[in-house]
Amino acid sequence: MAKYHAARQTGNGRGREIAVKTDRYQIIANITFLGMEGCWLYAIMHLLNVKSAGGILSVPLFITLYPLSFIVSKLVARLQWHKSYLQTINWVIWLAVMLLMVKMQLFGDAGFFSPVWLNAVPQAIKRIFFSFEPALLILLCSILFWWLGQRMAHIRIDFAGAIGEFQFGLIIMLSTFFVIHQMGVDFSGSIAVAIAFVIFALLGLSITHAREGKSWLAEPTRGHWSSILVICIVVSLLTGLLITSLVTPDFLEMVLRGLKWIWNSIIEAILFIIGLFPSSDPEPAELPPAPAPIAPIDKEFMRVSLIPEWLRQGIRVTLVFVFLAGCVIALWQVSSQILDWMRNRLKGSGDAEITTIHGALKDDLINFLKRILLKGLSIFEFRPAFLKSRKKSNLPPLEAVSVHQVYHQFLHWAAKKGHPRETHQTPNEYFYTMANLLPEAEAEMGFLTQLYVSTRYGLSLPGENELHKLRQSWQYVKRCHFKKEL
């Protein structure tokens, strides 16, 4: 009985240690995801602040809504109440935080109970067709930031999701930098934002890759690889800063002058060669008299008499929304094409497992709009069936994905050694073949094969101890040598 209690206490301690380690990796992965999205959100918010609010808003203070929404969503989810109650509490907190942000950003000198800042948002909504006020920008951006924080609190953090976040964020940030440059907006912190985005992306990809047990962080020599990673990051940053210091406007102007001189020299050489041939052009005929100039149209008269002011404002707002929708659709198409290209490249890889990215932005946006419309129509007791959210497809659990990846790495390693698995062989048949070639690792290969079969074709999932033993078995198999054939 004493041995049983001691073993039970040891097991509980190991379980707590694994849980603490998992929570630590989860927190660090969440921070890297928040950092990646926060960088391109900062760039977008800076552009909107300059062009729509005249630069009077504090962008760093406004960005704090994003991690605040994430923290609130995590805390509210612990209440274990109905989902509708949790959503109500979450958005009530958003309303209070949004009004407090209006007070701090626009009406810092007003009293706390003054109706001036309390009525700022309703008044801005009423005047939306005549002017776009900063209070309206705070309202719309706070809704977006709060929803993104909730989304980040409920998505599964994995390596595939990290790749998707990095690709989408990179496209959005580069597009925003291009628009900022074309509009002539001063953004002195663009280099710092870009460097921070790259650092968060590298950390997120490394951590999520290590959690699945297939990266250098899971290897025994991870200290050596971590040093190489730090050196590469430092060299990349120093190289980027050196290029940034060298490529100045004066340097670019000098390069353009040189290219212009070369082009003018080519044109002069072509004209000189043409001048060597005799000219046979006839005398130019007398040009007809120029027609009388047309009286200019009074644009002020046309603007005042034909298009009212409120209609012009409405057309402007509509065109802006159409332009933004077109940009989002274009970016979505580019991201989809990049992902399709990567998926086609990975099809032939033996150690690649292609799975659907959980929490895709497209599905989240569609479901979010459906929920808003469904809640609005539920007031009139009308709930159409097509607005109800469909259940998402069952994605393979993270434990099953880890087992599949290790087994595929084993197949790829054996194929490189000259012993590939035939198409007609089952996993057990292939194990018997490999056991004859590698007898010293027969037990480890048997455990690896049986765990893969039970996970792939059965309904059982491995535990933390089995996954740890799986990685140890795979490391042992890689160090073994094949039996020499007679």
Image (cartoon, grey):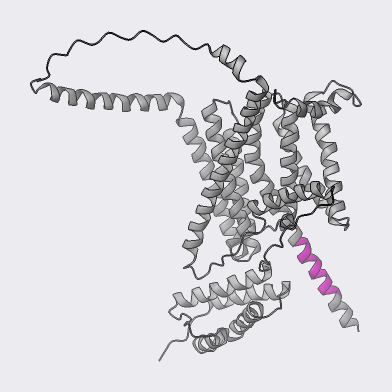
Taking the spot 83% from the left edge, 32% from the top edge, the residue there is: 100
* Of 444 and 53, the residue lying toward us: 53
Picture coordinates of residue 4, whole percent (x, y): 87, 82
In what quadrant of the picture does the C terminus appear? bottom left
Residue 139 appears in which quarter of the rendering?
Answer: top right
* 470 in relation to 30, above or below: below
Residue 275 appears in which quarter of the rendering?
Answer: top left
Residue 400: in magenta span: no
* 425 in relation to 399, above or below: below
Residue 20: in magenta span: yes
Taking the spot 90% from the left edge, 26% from the top edge, the residue there is: 112
Picture coordinates of residue 432, whole percent (x, y): 54, 89
* Of 35 and 14, the residue lying toward us: 35
Picture coordinates of residue 6, whole percent (x, y): 87, 77
> Left of 279 or right of it: where is 126?
right
Magenta part of the chain: 9-21
Taking the spot 70% from the left edge, 26% from the top edge, the residue there is: 129
Picture coordinates of residue 164, whole percent (x, y): 59, 53
In what quadrant of the picture does the N terminus appear? bottom right
> Left of 155 or right of it: where is 383?
right
* 278 in relation to 486, above or below: above
